[in-house]
Amino acid sequence: MTNLIDAAKSGNKRATLIALRDKLAETIQNCDSGRDMASNSKRLMEVIAEIEALDKEEEELRKAKEVKVSKHDRLKKKNENR
């Protein structure tokens, strides 16, 4: 588990969200107050959604960067290299 303060100082948004998620989960597990548990649980779900959205955005960017080459283009390039 990454330290929340170190993650925040790093400037890495995903690492900070992961550390916050872990800290919230730990807080919820040790919580005796129903009111605090409810608010922390809500925040935990929001943080999880933020992580999922960030991961989805990164995946879409990765896919957009992949060069898709058709079979025709591969054969054309192969013939050019002969």
Image (cartoon, grey):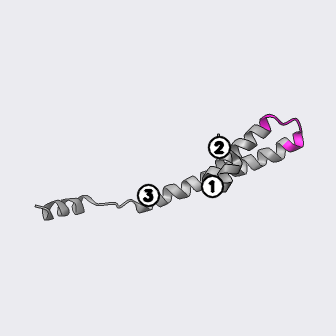
Identify the residue under disc 1.
10
Callout 3: SS: helix
Residue shown at the point (71%, 50%) measured from the top left: 5
Q: Badge 1: how crowded within 10 Å, few (<14), some, or many (20+)?
A: few
The magenta stretch is: 28-36
Q: Position of residue 36 (x, y in %)?
A: 86, 44
Q: Are marks 3 and 1 in contact (CB under 8 Å)?
A: no
Q: Taking 48 as reference, is 59 left or right?
A: left
Q: Amino acid at mark 2?
A: Thr
Q: Taking 22 as reference, is 53 left or right?
A: left
Q: Taking 11 as reference, is 76 left or right?
A: left
Q: Amino acid at mark 3?
A: Lys
Q: Is residue 65 above or below residue 1?
A: below
Identify the residue under disc 3.
63
Q: Separation of disc 3 and disc 1 at Cα?
A: 26 Å
Q: Amino acid at mark 1?
A: Ser
Q: Taking 55 as reference, is 65 left or right?
A: left
Compare marks 3 and 1 and give the one earlier in the sequence.
1
Q: Separation of disc 2 and disc 3 at Cα?
A: 29 Å
Q: Position of residue 30 (x, y in %)?
A: 81, 34
Identify the residue under disc 2.
2
